[in-house]
């Protein structure tokens, strides 16, 4: 990987070595021999092509795909940047080089580009649906093993906000913690005693739990599966003392109704675990 590309990945909040390892794993899955391309094209034959959008959306993963091209000795030129909106027909990346290498790179690059751009596009739709409110869409830890950093990066490309990256970044007191500890207060105070400066979010199923959380100084509350009416009331009684995040049963169609209650975030695990791939194709010139 060139130093320039490594710097681009670091600037995006990604670990260049981790991305390179992932790309090498993807390429290794295709084996050592391309029994389709190698009999057709000689080692000296070259081609040019464009990776182009086949629908409207938001791009993510251009520097990640670039790692594939550099790994295989394919020259590339990015025509758009991550986070850019594109329309059907827009060229995302142009490539040139050995025909065999381009065809070997095609699927690995597309798998990464289409998946990450799908997440970015879905995220942008949620954020667009809430335009004019203060609410932001936020992801979760519902990510594919080994792809969390990339999937959460794609959320950022789409205008969303990342929740914690791991169990060590912040505490999230959920219903099972509360049940096993005996109360919301006991669970929260145990974490505060161990980690006085750690960000702690507490899940609340009822308005009574919201009031309990506020009474012990919780400053981040997850409103789990509450009605719009209860979320509105939670915003009222919180009165700015804590950030509020709506979670559970959220749909794109309901996004604006939830956002206008005044909550700060909408937690949407589907951004990463259920986003449809974005349609991109490679066409030779």
Image (spheres, rainbow, N blue to C red):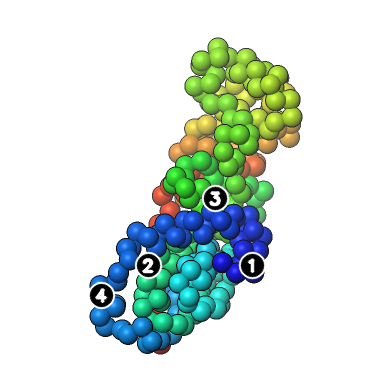
For mark 1, give the secondary structure. Answer: helix
For mark 4, give the secondary structure. Answer: loop
Residue 261 location, x and y as percent?
Answer: 61, 40
Residue 210 location, x and y as percent?
Answer: 62, 24
**Residue 176 or residue 284, whichever sits in front:** 284
User: Residue 6 sits in which quadrant?
Assistant: bottom right
For label 1, the crowd category at 10 Å Cα-Cα, with few meaning under 14, some 14 to 19 and many 20 or more, is: few
> Tag on residue 36?
4
> Tag on residue 107?
2
CA–CA distance in space, label 2 to label 4: 14 Å
For label 2, the crowd category at 10 Å Cα-Cα, with few meaning under 14, some 14 to 19 and many 20 or more, is: some
**Residue 103 or residue 187, whichever sits in front:** 103
CA–CA distance in space, label 4 to label 3: 34 Å
**Sequence order check: which comes first, mark 4 or mark 3?**
4
Q: Is residue 102 above or below residue 202?
A: below
User: Which residue in the structure is indicated by mark 3?
Assistant: 149
User: Residue 159 sits in which quadrant?
Assistant: bottom right
Residue 161 location, x and y as percent?
Answer: 61, 49
CA–CA distance in space, label 1 to label 4: 34 Å
**Residue 143 or residue 175, whichever sits in front:** 143
Q: Is residue 130 above or below residue 278?
A: above
For mark 3, give the secondary structure. Answer: helix
CA–CA distance in space, label 3 to label 2: 21 Å
User: Which residue in the structure is indicated by mark 1?
Assistant: 3
């Amino acid at each position: 990987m060139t130093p320039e590309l490594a710097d681009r990945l670091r600037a995006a909040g990604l670990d260049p070595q981790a991305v390179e390892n992932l790309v090498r794993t993807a390429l290794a899955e295709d084996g050592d021999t391309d029994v389709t391309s190698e009999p057709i094209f000689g080692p000296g034959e070259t081609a040019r092509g464009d990776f182009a959008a086949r629908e409207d959306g938001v791009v993510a993963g251009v520097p990640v795909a670039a790692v594939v091209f550099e790994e295989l000795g394919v020259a590339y030129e990015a025509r758009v940047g991550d986070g850019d909106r594109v329309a059907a027909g827009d060229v995302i990346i142009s490539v040139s080089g050995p025909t065999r290498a381009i065809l070997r790179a095609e699927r690995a690059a597309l798998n990464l580009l289409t998946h990450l751009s799908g997440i970015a596009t879905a995220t942008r739709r949620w954020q667009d649906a809430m335009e004019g409110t203060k609410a932001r869409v936020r992801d979760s830890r519902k990510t594919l093993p080994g792809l969390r950093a990339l999937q959460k990066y794609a959320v950022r490309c789409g205008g969303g906000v990342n929740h914690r990256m791991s169990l060590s970044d912040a505490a999230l007191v959920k219903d099972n913690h509360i049940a096993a500890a005996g109360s919301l207060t006991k669970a929260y105070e145990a974490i505060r005693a161990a980690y006085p400066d750690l960000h702690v979010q507490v899940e609340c199923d009822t308005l009574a739990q919201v009031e309990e959380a506020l009474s012990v100084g919780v400053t981040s509350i997850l409103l789990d599966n509450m009605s719009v009416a209860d979320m509105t009331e939670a915003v009222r009684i919180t009165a700015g003392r804590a950030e509020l995040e709506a979670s559970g049963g959220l749909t794109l169609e309901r996004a604006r109704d939830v956002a206008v209650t005044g909550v700060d975030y909408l937690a949407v695990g589907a951004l990463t675990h259920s986003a449809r791939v974005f349609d991109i194709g490679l066409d030779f010139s």
